Image (cartoon, helix red, strand yellow):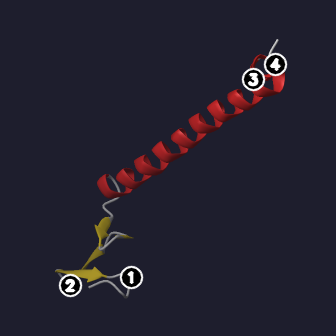
């Protein structure tokens, strides 16, 4: 029996392969959750994505019959 066959048939090699497989699946799920969270904020929570930054929605209030925008982020235009 050659040393290559001994490595492939060893339990530690199988454990390393299984660990790499499940780690890659966990990372893929994490990336999908991050992407879905981004789209959820843009589509349902009305966030704006300007200049590479995610801005929260502008709160609108009615004061004396006029619509007034209350800007949460002072850096935003």
Secondary structure of the residue carrying tag 4 is: helix
Would you name the residue on which mark 3 appears? 14
Cβ–Cβ under 8 Å for marks 1 and 3: no
Q: Identify the mark nearer the N-term, 2 or 3.
A: 3
Residue at x 64% of width, y 38% of height: 23
Q: Position of residue 42 (x, y in %)?
A: 32, 57
Which of pointers 2 and 3 indicates the residue nearer the eye? 3
Q: Identify the mark nearer the N-term, 1 or 2.
A: 2
Q: Quadrant of residue 2?
A: top right
Q: Quadrant of residue 25?
A: top right
69 displayed left or right of 24 = left
Cα distance between the residues tagged 2 and 3: 71 Å
37 displayed left or right of 43 = right
Residue at x 26% of width, y 81% of height: 69
Label number found at residue 6: 4
Which of pointers 1 and 3 indicates the residue nearer the eye? 3
Cα distance between the residues tagged 4 and 1: 62 Å
Label number found at residue 73: 1
Would you name the residue on which mark 2 appears? 64
Residue at x 33% of width, y 52% of height: 44
Nearest the viewer among 49 and 15 is 15
Nearest the viewer among 51 and 23 is 23
Residue 20 against residue 65 in the figure, above or below: above
- The number of callouts visible is 4
Q: Quadrant of residue 16?
A: top right
Which of pointers 4 and 2 indicates the residue nearer the eye? 4
Residue 13 against residue 23 in the figure, above or below: above
């Amino acid at each position: 029996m050659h040393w290559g066959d001994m490595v492939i048939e060893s339990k530690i090699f199988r454990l390393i392969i299984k660990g790499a497989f499940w780690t890659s699946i966990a990372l893929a799920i994490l990336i999908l959750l991050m992407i879905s969270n981004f789209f959820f904020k843009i589509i349902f929570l009305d966030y704006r994505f300007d200049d590479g930054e995610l801005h929260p929605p502008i709160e609108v209030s009615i004061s004396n019959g006029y619509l007034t925008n209350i800007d949460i982020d002072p850096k935003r235009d």
